[in-house]
């Protein structure tokens, strides 16, 4: 009698791996041919289906590359929860070649201001847009008001739609997230005189003066009137760490405290040593973004990769060893610490 083997179940291919398998085997060549001929046929629909298989919330486009002839971008459309998926897509990409390079966010398009767009029955020449730029040096952000002569004739949401679209084109998706604070409409043209080139220059100047890993000291009060001291990173922005989407609070009790609830000098030194030990245990797997001290306890705020169990375990082990406790929550976009910014 012969031996019979159970037929192995087919291995399910991860959607990102499936995308790149399709791209390498046929997509790249067909898209390159379409770029040359201008004949796209059903390729856009096919690409949309491939990207939707990775996640239906992602968007894509192609354009001119910087080093390669063409650029393929898969974008989260500004959604922090989807950005980590776009980053995973990018990290699995094949090496760029002379034909194609890849990006996980829309890149700046220097020629955008030459475009004319149709919206709400109006033809807007984007070169006529002007900006009022206000620097927030402490937060390393630019608050921007946008003006176009035709904004006054457009439906209520139309001017903001055009403004965000144009800012994405001028600065790139990440540039807007990283450097732009409030966006408003300037009703009076005389108050908004900066051009797109001026805006780009302002961003470059702020980037050149940026001081990463600064810390700001904030003071407030708890609900029962006790002093609360917060130290937070400046600038505090998730876009610099797009896959760190897990927020972990580490709760530590101070050994001794003063009448106002803050730790004594000796207890503060001990808390600092514990913080250093926990941060060292986490290492490159995450980042400490803030800590707050009040009412006999200190809370450390960390972010790490939600899919990295080793990072989560390192935090829990180090915290419990020091007598502390942990609380984890999914937080793409770092909304839980936004009030510290």
Image (cartoon, rainbow, N blue to C red):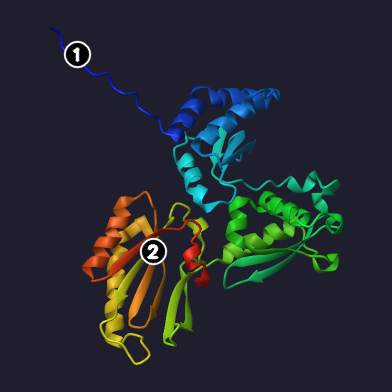
Return the residue nearer the eye: 150 or 8. 8
Depicted 201 relative to depicted 255: above or below:
above
Depicted 296 relative to depicted 208: above or below:
below
Q: Check disc 2 and report its element: helix, strand or loop.
A: strand
Q: Which residue is drawn at 84% across and 67% down?
A: 188
Depicted 211 relative to depicted 332: above or below:
below
Q: Quadrant of residue 36?
A: top right
Return the residue nearer the eye: 166 or 185. 185
In the drawing, what numbered circle is on residue 4?
1
Q: In which quarter of the image is the N terminus?
A: top left
Label 1 vs label 2, nearer the camera: 1
Residue 127 visible in the snapshot: yes
Depicted 1 relative to depicted 289: above or below:
above
Q: Is residue 249 left or right of residue 146?
A: left
Q: Check disc 1 and report its element: helix, strand or loop.
A: loop
Q: In this view, does 101 lie to the left or right of 168?
A: left
Q: Residue at x 80, y 64 (%)?
A: 193
The image position of residue 245, as x and y in percent, is 44, 55
Q: Which residue is drawn at 56% across and 42% down?
A: 58
Which residue is labeled 2 in the image? 302
How many marks the image carries: the answer is 2
Q: Is residue 280 left or right of residue 198?
A: left
Return the residue nearer the eye: 229 or 66. 229
């Amino acid at each position: 009698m012969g031996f019979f083997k159970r037929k192995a179940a087919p291995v399910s291919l991860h959607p990102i791996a499936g995308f790149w398998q399709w791209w390498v085997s046929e997509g790249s060549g067909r898209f390159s041919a379409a770029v040359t001929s201008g004949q796209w046929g059903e390729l856009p629909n096919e690409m949309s289906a491939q990207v939707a298989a990775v996640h239906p919330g992602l968007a894509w486009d192609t354009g001119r590359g910087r080093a390669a002839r063409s650029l393929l971008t898969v974008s989260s459309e500004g959604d922090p929860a989807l950005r980590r998926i776009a980053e995973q897509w990018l990290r699995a990409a094949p090496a760029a070649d002379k034909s194609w390079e890849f990006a996980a966010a829309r890149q700046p398009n220097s020629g955008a201001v030459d475009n004319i767009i149709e919206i709400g029955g109006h033809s807007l020449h984007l070169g006529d847009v002007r900006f009022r730029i206000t620097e927030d040096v402490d937060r390393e952000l630019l608050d921007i008001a946008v003006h176009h002569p035709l904004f006054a004739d457009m439906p209520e949401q139309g001017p903001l739609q055009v403004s965000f679209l144009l800012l994405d084109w001028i600065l790139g998706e990440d540039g807007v997230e990283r450097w732009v604070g409030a966006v408003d409409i300037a009703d009076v043209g005389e108050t908004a005189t900066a051009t797109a080139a001026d805006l780009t220059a302002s961003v470059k100047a702020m980037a050149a003066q940026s001081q990463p890993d600064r810390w700001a000291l904030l003071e407030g009060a708890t609900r029962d009137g006790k002093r609360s001291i917060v130290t937070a990173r400046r600038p505090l922005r998730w876009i610099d760490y797009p896959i760190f989407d897990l927020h972990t609070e580490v709760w530590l009790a101070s050994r001794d405290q003063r009448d106002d609830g803050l730790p004594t000098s000796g207890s503060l030194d001990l808390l600092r040593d514990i913080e250093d030990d926990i941060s060292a245990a986490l290492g490159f797997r995450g980042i400490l973004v803030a800590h707050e001290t009040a009412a006999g306890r200190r809370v450390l705020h960390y972010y790490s990769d939600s899919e990295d169990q080793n990072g989560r375990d390192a935090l829990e082990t180090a915290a419990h060893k020091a007598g502390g406790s942990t609380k984890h929550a999914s937080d793409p976009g770092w909304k839980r610490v936004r009030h510290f910014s």
